[in-house]
Amino acid sequence: MAGRTYDYVVVLKQRDFKLVDNISLMMLFLAIVVLMESALTPFSNASVFPVTIVALIIGWVAFTFVKKKNGKTAYFRIAMLFAAWGLMMTLPMPYTWLTAVYVIAAVAEKQVKFPREVAFDEEEVVFNTFPRSHYHWSEFSNIVLKDGLLTIDFKNNKLLQKEIDSHVPPQLEQDFNAFCKNKIQVSEQ
């Protein structure tokens, strides 16, 4: 939520990205198969490019697995862009549209894995989604942070309850709840 300072930013618990990672790995495997088939039939000096792209893809996937093992979020988007580049340069003309699929997947992966945050300031509440959702305090009937859960009760009877990413000290929890209660009361006047 760059470009603006918020009084409170609550980071929500990350979802499991197994499905996204598995789809990315499957797409990369298919790209490797296509690129290796292109490189080996018939083998010539032109085969160096697809083999190099395959090496780059495998190297990035290995690097990503090391990052994942160390507890960081795995991003396969660079490998997807390598695959898109390789497919664009090696596939015959009617199939180059597959490049767009890989580029879209690379861009979408970043957005899907972006940390979910809810920011609170004097004027509004902002959900860090794509596109960003802005709500005025007058749209809420209650907002409470308690026992690792953020509960947001909208006036239109929509209820949002999400786990937060880390432990919040009791004093900060009280300050946050008082801030939200005050903002909601002021907006009702």
Image (tube, rainbow, N blue to C red):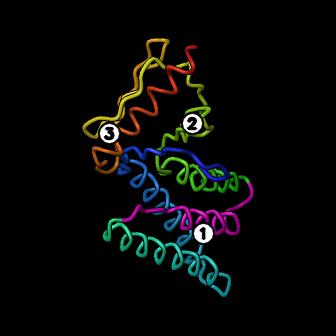
Q: Which is more toward the observer, 81 or 91?
A: 81
Judged from the image, the secondary structure of the residue bearing numbered disc 1 is helix
Q: What is the three-letter code of the residue carrying label 3?
A: Glu
Disc 1, disc 2: CB below 8 Å? no
Distance in Å between CA atoms under marks 2 and 3:
17 Å
Q: Position of residue 104 (x, y in %)?
A: 62, 50
Q: Which residue is mark 3?
A: 163
Q: Which is more toward the observer, 40 or 50?
A: 50
Q: Which is more toward the observer, 36 or 105?
A: 105
Distance in Å between CA atoms under marks 1 and 3:
36 Å
Q: Position of residue 114 (x, y in %)?
A: 50, 51
Q: Which residue is mark 2?
A: 126
Query: Residue at coordinates 31% horizontally, 69% vertically from top-left?
Result: 69
Distance in Å between CA atoms under marks 1 and 2:
35 Å
Q: Which residue is mark 1?
A: 82
Span shown in magenta: 72-93
- Please tell me whether residue 79 belongs to the stretch shown in magenta: yes
Q: What is the three-letter code of the residue carrying label 2?
A: Val
Q: Nearer the viewer, mark 1 or mark 2?
A: 2
